[in-house]
Image (spheres, grey):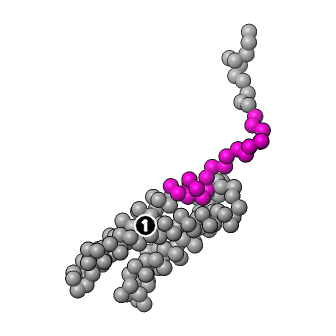
């Protein structure tokens, strides 16, 4: 979804603003991602209130947004890989590599780790809850 929205915007109304196109694309993808993660990827994990879980999800995703946009920003505005400094082909290859490959991979790894750790953690036994002891093996019986 990120790629479709990014290129749809970058090749039309946001042609001179690729970083803005990337940010909008990631925001749209993040909203869809929350629903899919909650209902599919991490449906057996969590246990927090939905508001708290959603707030954590969007906080983690905000960091992911920065991580996914940073390589494109560096490519364009630090390395000046944009026309007229380089050819249009070079600009488009640099945009694709920095935004869609490098940025997406960095953000994907960060999000997966952070979502598992903070947003959808394994449920911990609550204090005061009763845990059953494992049944003894037949080898553990006294003779």
In the rendered image, the quadrant that contains the C terminus is: top right
Task: Give above or below for 102 relative to 18.
Answer: above
Badge 1: how crowded within 10 Å, few (<14), some, or many (20+)?
many
Residue that appears at 50% across and 55% down: 113
Q: Nearer the viewer, residue 82 or 128?
A: 128
Q: In the rendered structure, does residue 123 fall within the stretch colored magenta?
A: yes
Give the image location of residue 40, x and y in percent: 61, 61
Give the image location of residue 127, x and y in percent: 74, 43
Q: In the rendered structure, does residue 84 fall within the stretch colored magenta?
A: no
Residue corresponding to mark 1: 67
- Left or right: where 25 falls relative to 45: left
Task: Give above or below for 16 relative to 55.
Answer: below
Q: Nearer the viewer, residue 18 or 77?
A: 77
Residue that appears at 51% across and 69% down: 62
- Circle 1 SS class: helix
**Which image quadrant is residue 138 in?**
top right
Residue that appears at 41% across and 62% down: 106
* Label total for image: 1
Residue that appears at 42% across and 90% down: 13
Task: Give above or below for 47 relative to 76.
Answer: above
- Left or right: where 142 falls relative to 24: right
What range of the chain is rendered magenta?
A: 113-132
């Amino acid at each position: 979804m990120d790629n479709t929205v990014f290129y749809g915007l970058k090749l039309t109304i946001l042609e001179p603003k690729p970083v803005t196109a990337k940010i909008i694309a990631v925001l749209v993808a993040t909203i869809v991602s929350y629903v899919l993660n909650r209902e599919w990827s991490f449906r057996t994990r969590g246990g927090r209130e939905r508001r708290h879980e959603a707030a954590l999800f969007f906080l983690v995703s905000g960091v992911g947004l920065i991580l996914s946009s940073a390589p494109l920003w560096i490519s364009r505005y630090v390395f000046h890989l944009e026309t007229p400094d380089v050819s249009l082909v070079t600009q488009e290859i640099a945009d694709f590599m920095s935004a869609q490959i490098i940025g997406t991979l960095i953000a994907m790894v960060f999000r997966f780790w952070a979502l598992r750790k903070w947003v959808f953690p394994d449920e911990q036994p609550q204090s005061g809850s009763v845990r059953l002891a494992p049944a003894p093996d037949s080898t553990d019986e006294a003779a």
